[in-house]
Amino acid sequence: MSKDLVDLIVNLNEKEAVEIVQRKVKAGEAPLKILDQARTAMAIVGKRFENKEFLLPELIMSGEILRQITEIIKPKLKADVKVKRLGKVVLGTVFGDIHDIGKDIVKFMLEANGFEVYDLGADVSKEKFVEKIKEVKPEIVALSGFLTLAYDSMKEIIKEIRKAGLKDKVGIMVGGGQTDETIRKYVEADAYGKDAAEAVAIAKKWVGI
């Protein structure tokens, strides 16, 4: 059944994808499991976009499907989480990448778990990240990137944060698309989160929870 959802999203079958998610939620399937299936689908979409099998309209359409899925499971996620203020997170999709679906899921999960999230949006410059870090003094910075071109952007942003003398004041995590532990080392981040749940776990660990 999970493969069905992945295929429906990848093939841009909006109506069927939304219906199967509604059935999954009604049947009591864990919302994080549904999100993981959607993440798998979006990774495939991203690869097709990079290989020029998909164009921007397809990327936008897949994002719209994921937004609808997220809206369906939000109430269940909120019901499963007890909120307590934990810390501040500056979050954004790095410059050169306009994809914000994965970032939005991470934002929602962090907020649901009690973090105050400052979302800078997509295609965010290194200067904007540094400016926001100076302004709000977060414990955590989260860099999102869906496309492989985002890796060099992540590296430049972290370099800029270090140059500004802020690196020792924040923990930096990266995630999204094809990001993995190898990319984490390349960009010199402190942690890699494979999904929203792991991003929350890392954030909690860094603030001592």
Image: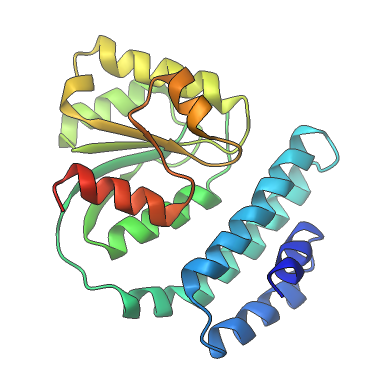
Quadrant of the snapshot with the N terminus: bottom right
Q: Residue furthest front?
A: 181
Quadrant of the snapshot with the C terminus: bottom left
Residue 84, compared with residue 209, is above or below; it is below
Using residue 203 as the reference point, say whether residue 98 is left or right of it.
right
Residue 104, compared with residue 1, is above or below; it is above
Give the image quarter of residue 164. top left
Point 86% across, 40% down: residue = 53
Residue 98 picture location, percent across and down:
58, 38
Residue 9 picture location, percent across and down:
73, 62
Give the image quarter of residue 155. top left
Using residue 149 as the reference point, say whether residue 157 is left or right of it.
left
Q: Please say which color scheme the image uses.
A: rainbow
Q: Residue furthest right?
A: 53
Residue 180 picture location, percent across and down:
53, 35
Point 53% across, 46% down: residue = 100
Q: Residue furthest top?
A: 163
Using residue 21 as the reference point, say whether residue 85 is left or right of it.
left
Point 48% across, 31% down: residue = 181
Q: Residue furthest bottom?
A: 26
Using residue 46 as the reference point, say whether residue 132 is left or right of it.
left
Residue 41, compared with residue 167, is above or below; it is below
Point 43% across, 24% down: residue = 125
